[in-house]
Image: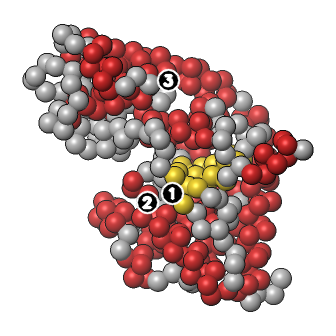
Amino acid sequence: MSEIIETTQKKKVLSCIQPSGMLTLGNYLGALKNWVAMQDEFDCTFAVADLHAITVRQEPAKLRAQIYSTYALLLALGIDPEKHTLFIQSHVPEHANLSWLLSCNTQFGEMSRMTQFKDKSAKHANNVNVGLFSYPVLMAADILLYKPDLVPVGADQKQHLEIARDIAIRFNNLYGDVFTIPDAYIPKTGARVMSLQDPTKKMSKSDDNLNSWVAILDSKDDIIRKFKRAVTDSEACVRFGAEKPGISNLMTIYSAITEKSIADIEKEFEGKGYGDFKLAVGESVADALAPIKTAYDEIIKDKKALEVLYKQGAQKAEYVARKTYFKAMKKVGFVL
Ligand code: TRP
C-alpha cells in the first residue's frame, strides 16, 4: 500500500533531445547526466525529438542513423525504459496533431519574438521554413501531452518553455482545464560547458573547430588530446575566476565529473602547472565516458533489441498522449 502511494505521488518530468549527430560532453554534463539522476526521484518521460530535427535540412540516411544512435546512447547512459518512458517523438502522432491545435491558439507575434528563431533563421538563411518558425509550438505539444510537473531545460530553451506555459494557460482559459502548467527544472548540479578553444562560447557540436568539443563517444586518446590543447591563459595557476574563462571551464568540467568542489580542486593543483591539470581533467572525462561508450557499442549492434524497446516506449507514451489529445479535441469542439 505504502509503495502504491509512493509511486503515485512521484512528480512527473518530461524532456526531449534532438538527434543531431554526436552528443557532446556539454550535453552530458549540462543535461543528460541529470536525466539519469532524476530517474530515482521522478516519474520520467524522455524522447528523441526527431520531428524537431527536420526544421533544418537533414540527409535522410544520416538522420535515420542519428535517431538510432541517440536512442541507443540514452540507453547506454542509463535511462531505464522499463521504469520510465523512452520513445521517439515521431512514433507518437499526437505530437504533430496537438501541435496543430496549439498553433491555432498561438500568435504570430509571440513566435516572432523567439530568440532561437532569430538566430537559426540567420544561420540557415536559405531555408527559413515555417516549421523552424513554429518549432516552439511543437515543443509545447511535446510537453503538454504528458502533463509533466517539471521540465528540465537549459538556458537556451527557457523561452520556449515559457511560451509552452503561456499557450497552456490560454488554452485552459478558453476551453476548460486540459493541460497542467509545467515548471522549469533547474538542476542542483548541471554544468554549463564551454568550448575548449573559445571558452566564452558554449561547447557545440556544430563548431567547425573539432578541438573545441568532446563527443560522449570520443576515444580516450581523442579526449586527452583535446584537453591538452584546450585554450587557457598565461598565469599558470589553477584558480577559478571570470578573468580565467579557459581554466574555469576546465575546473567546472573536472568538478562536474569528480564531484569535487572548486575549492578542493584549487588545493589539489596548488603549485602544479596547467599540463598536469589538463591531463587530470582529460583522464577523468575519458574514464567517466569509457563505460558509456562500451555500453553504446553493444546496444547499437542489436537493432532488433533496440526496435523492441522503442516500440514499447512509443506504446507507453501514446497511452498517455492520446488521452490528453482527445480531451483537447473534445474541448475545442471536434466530433469524436
Ligand atoms: N527544443 C529542444 C532542444 O533543441 C528539444 C526539445 C523538443 C525539448 N521538445 C522538447 C526539450 C520538450 C524539452 C521539452 O534542445
> Is residue 330 visible to the viewer in this orientation of the structure?
yes
Badge 3 element: helix
Disc 1 residue crowd, few under 14, some 14–19, many 20+, Cα 10 Å: some
Secondary element type, mark 1: strand
Quadrant (top left/top right/bottom left/bottom right) for the C terminus = bottom right
Q: Residue at x 23, y 29 (%)?
A: 240
Give above or below for 195 relative to 99.
above
Place residue 205 in its image quadrant. top left
Q: Which residue of the protein is positioned furthest toward the front in this rendering?
A: 2
Residue bearing the label numbered 2: 158
Q: Is mark 3 within 8 Å of ligand 1?
A: no
Which numbered disc, 2 or 3, marks the residue closer to the eye? 2
Tell me which numbered mark, 1 or 3, is placed earlier along the sequence: 1
Residue under label 3, please give it: 289
- Whether label 2 lies within 8 Å of ligand 1 gets the answer no
Question: Where is residue 173 shown, x and y percent of the image?
Answer: 61, 84
Q: Which of the labelled discs sits on residue 298, or is there none?
A: none
What residue is pinned by disc 1? 184
Tell me how far mark 1 sits from mark 2, CA to CA.
7 Å
CA gap, disc 1 to disc 3?
A: 28 Å
Marked residue nearer the N-terminal end (2 or 3): 2
Quarter of the figure with residue 197: top left
Secondary structure state at the residue bearing disc 2: helix
- Determine whether, in the image, residue 108 is placed left or right of residue 64: left
- Picture coordinates of residue 85, whole percent (x, y): 72, 47
